[in-house]
Image (cartoon, coloured by chain):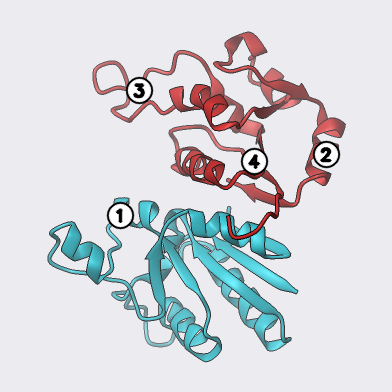
Chain colours: A cyan, B red
């Protein structure tokens, strides 16, 4: 089965963020295809390079990052949602004249069209949210 | 875009317009999605029906200092987004009628809403 995944909630705040990861990992391990994982609303914070959780806790951003590396996952952060929340990659930081960027490796920033495309191309779009 | 697939997209709006950002960001998806020529419907359920309430006053002078995005719902027709459904019970529980809403909608009871949802390919709930 080809899945699209939408993550609508932020890390550590809401179960949606963990469930989306667990689902995606399990699907990949079972041999399913993940067309794309799209991060929207506060979900964009899952891509923060600056998360510093306690050492005995999971590292949500790095966990996605590692999964992306292992399976060549397409992790897309919505640009509109990211900008208003202060999540910028290197290019955006430059373009907006900001002095820092904070997107972790494995994620990239793109538009909402990528979410619609995931809906069209996937057999199921699974939404993780409130 | 890439091929000729046309799917039925349903956006379910369940939250009041300004308490959280879901309503505004849902509308942003709808507007971008309109460019993909899919078969789009919107449903307004629970506090989501407040998104369509007429006379929203949110400016700094007269309200809560937020952008009033309710006018955008009236522009949806121009994007060929014309299927707007409101849950009857949610509307009535909040003391509203279709006269209080700023766009033309089709009011559905629970069974009709269920049937409409079952026909969809992609359901996005905000």
Q: Position of residue B96 (x, y in %)?
A: 63, 14
Same-subunit check for callouts 3 and 1:
no
- Residue wearing tag 3: B58
Q: Residue shown at 47%/53% (left/top)? A: A112
Q: Residue shown at 55%/23% (left/top)? A: B52
Residue B5 in which image quadrant:
bottom right
- Residue wearing tag 1: A83
Residue A37 in which image quadrant:
bottom right
Q: Is residue B24 left or right of residue A5?
A: left
Estimate the spatial distance between the alpha carbons at disc 3 and disc 1, rounded to whole Å: 23 Å
Dot 1: few (<14), some (14–19), or many (≥20) neighbours within 10 Å?
Answer: some
Which tag, 2 or 3, sits closer to the chain's start?
3
Q: Does dot 4 land on a helix, a strand or a loop?
A: strand
- Residue wearing tag 2: B114
Q: Position of residue B98 (x, y in %)?
A: 66, 13
Estimate the spatial distance between the alpha carbons at disc 1 and disc 4, rounded to whole Å: 24 Å
Disc 3: which chain? B
Q: Are marks 3 and 1 in contact (CB under 8 Å)?
A: no
Q: Position of residue B2 (x, y in %)?
A: 59, 60
Same-subunit check for callouts 4 and 2:
yes
Q: Which marked residue is nearer to the observer: mark 4 or mark 3?
A: 4
Quadrant (top left/top right/bottom left/bottom right) for the N terminus of chain A: bottom right
Disc 4: which chain? B
Q: Residue shown at 61%/32% (left/top)? A: B81
Q: Is residue B86 left or right of residue A64?
A: right
Q: Does dot 2 land on a helix, a strand or a loop?
A: helix
Estimate the spatial distance between the alpha carbons at disc 2 and disc 1, rounded to whole Å: 36 Å
Q: Which marked residue is nearer to the observer: mark 2 or mark 3?
A: 2
Say which mark, if any, is on residue B12.
Answer: 4
Same-subunit check for callouts 2 and 3:
yes
Dot 2: few (<14), some (14–19), or many (≥20) neighbours within 10 Å?
Answer: few
């Amino acid at each position: 089965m080809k899945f699209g995944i939408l993550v609508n909630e932020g890390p550590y705040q809401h179960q949606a963020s963990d469930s989306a990861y667990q689902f995606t990992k399990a699907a990949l391990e079972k041999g399913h295809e993940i067309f794309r994982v799209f991060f929207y609303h506060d979900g964009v914070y899952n891509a923060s390079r600056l998360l510093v959780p306690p050492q005995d806790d999971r590292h949500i951003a790095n966990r996605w990052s590692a999964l992306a590396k292992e399976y060549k996952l397409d992790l897309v952060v919505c640009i509109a949602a990211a900008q208003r929340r202060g999540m910028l990659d290197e290019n955006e930081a430059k373009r907006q004249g900001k002095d820092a960027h904070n997107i972790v490796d494995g994620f990239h920033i793109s538009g909402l069209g990528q979410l619609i495309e995931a809906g069209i191309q996937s057999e199921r779009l699974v939404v993780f949210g409130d | 875009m890439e091929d000729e697939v046309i799917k039925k997209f349903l956006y379910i709006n369940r939250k009041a317009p300004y308490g959280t950002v879901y309503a505004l960001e849902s509308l942003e998806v709808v507007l971008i999605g309109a460019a993909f020529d899919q078969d789009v419907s919107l449903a307004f359920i629970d506090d989501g029906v407040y998104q369509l309430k007429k006379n929203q006053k949110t400016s700094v002078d007269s309200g809560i200092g937020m952008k009033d995005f309710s006018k955008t719902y009236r522009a949806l027709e121009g994007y060929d987004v014309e299927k707007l459904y409101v849950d009857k019970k949610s509307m009535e529980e909040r003391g509203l009628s279709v006269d209080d809403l700023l766009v033309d909608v089709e009011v559905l009871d629970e069974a009709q809403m269920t049937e409409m949802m079952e026909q969809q390919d992609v359901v996005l709930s905000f």
